[in-house]
Image (cartoon, rainbow, N blue to C red):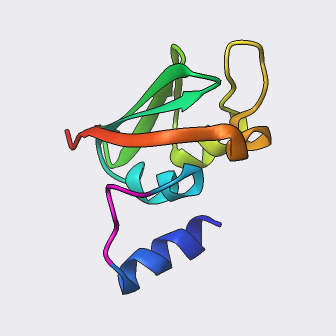
Amino acid sequence: MKWRVDDLYKLIEFDEDYFDFFDLYYLLNSPHKIKFLYEDEEMNLESVMEDDECVVCFNGKCYHSRDDFFKDATIKDGTKLTAIYGDLYGFQVMDNC
């Protein structure tokens, strides 16, 4: 999925006003602050440069890469984001760090 998303945005311009969970593969490749909603609860994540790679911070935990984030990130009850991706909505880029 990562390569598909990366390749897609080599062909078309990213639309910051309309994106969803898997588009985060593109955004998390560089520093960003992003918010989204799940069951009306606001969630925030941030990617920051550490050496030559972006580290992703979500729910008080930092992931060494966007791959680790997509593989392991969970909400507070332990449910993986990838299991509920269809229920995540209201994605917004808050800051391009």
The C terminus appears in which quarter of the rendering?
Answer: top left
Q: Position of residue 53 (x, y in %)?
A: 38, 47
Quadrant of the image occupied by residue 17: bottom left
Q: Position of residue 26 (x, y in %)?
A: 43, 60
Q: Is residue 62 magenta?
A: no
The N terminus appears in which quarter of the rendering?
Answer: bottom right
> With 9 as the anchor, is 62 left or right in this view?
right
Q: Position of residue 24 (x, y in %)?
A: 49, 51
Q: Residue furthest front?
A: 40
Q: Is residue 16 magenta?
A: yes
Q: Is residue 50 visible?
A: no
The stretch in magenta equals 13-18
Between residue 50 and residue 86, name the one nearer to us: 86
Quadrant of the image occupied by residue 45: top left
Rendered residue at 41%/58% (across/down):
18
Q: Is residue 53 above or below residue 2?
A: above
Question: Mainly helix, strand or loop, the magenta region?
Answer: loop
Q: Is residue 63 visible?
A: yes
Q: Residue furthest bottom?
A: 11
Q: Is residue 38 above or below residue 67?
A: above
Quadrant of the image occupied by residue 87: top right
> With 9 as the anchor, is 1 left or right in this view?
right
Rendered residue at 53%/70% (across/down):
5
